[in-house]
Image (cartoon, rainbow, N blue to C red):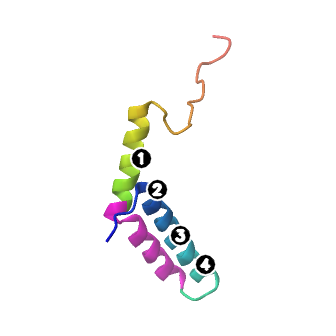
């Protein structure tokens, strides 16, 4: 079995989450079942590893995630 890249693992988890939400919205499953499904998706070790790897690579490359901190200095002081 081929190992998925981090991007593929993330995309697969996103797709599974969207299917779970669609099932809830079309009333194929109730809200409690949908929440349980979403928790199972988010609780996957592979997803956690993928997120950790992406964050580690972003930090190591200095690229960050495109988020800049707001300037918190008070004006006029």
Q: Could you say whether the residue bearing mark 2 is in a helix, strand or loop?
A: helix
Residue 32 belongs to magenta span: yes
For marks 1 and 3 on the same chain, the one whose residue lies earlier in the sequence: 3
The front one of 64 and 7 is 7
Q: Name the residue furthest front.
A: 2
Q: How many neighbours does mark 1 have within 10 angstroms: few (below 14), some (14-19), or many (20 or more)? A: some
For marks 2 and 1 on the same chain, the one whose residue lies earlier in the sequence: 2
**Which numbered dot is residue 15?**
3
Residue at the location (56% across, 30% down)? Answer: 69
**Which numbered dot is residue 22?**
4
Q: Where residue 16 sits in the image (x, y, percent)?
A: 50, 72
Q: Nearer the viewer, mark 2 or mark 1?
A: 2
Q: Where residue 9 sits in the image (x, y, percent)?
A: 43, 62
Q: Where residue 14 sits in the image (x, y, percent)?
A: 52, 65
- Find residue 61 and report its image quarter: top left
For marks 1 and 4 on the same chain, the one whose residue lies earlier in the sequence: 4
Q: Tell me the magenta residue range.
A: 30-46
Q: Which residue is mark 1?
A: 54
**Which numbered dot is residue 7?**
2
The quarter in which the N terminus is drawn is: bottom left
Q: How far apart are the alpha carbons under marks 2 and 1?
A: 9 Å
40 left or right of 16? left
Q: Name the residue furthest right.
A: 76
Residue at the location (48% across, 80% down)? Answer: 32
Q: Could you say whether the residue bearing mark 3 is in a helix, strand or loop?
A: helix
Q: Nearer the viewer, mark 1 or mark 4?
A: 1
């Amino acid at each position: 079995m081929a190992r998925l890249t981090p991007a593929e693992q993330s995309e697969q988890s996103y797709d599974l989450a969207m299917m779970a939400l669609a099932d809830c919205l079309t009333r194929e499953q109730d809200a409690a079942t949908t929440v349980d499904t979403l928790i199972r998706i988010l609780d996957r070790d592979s997803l956690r590893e993928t997120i950790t790897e992406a964050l580690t690579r972003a930090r190591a490359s200095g690229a960050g995630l495109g988020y800049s901190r707001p300037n918190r200095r008070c004006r006029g002081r």
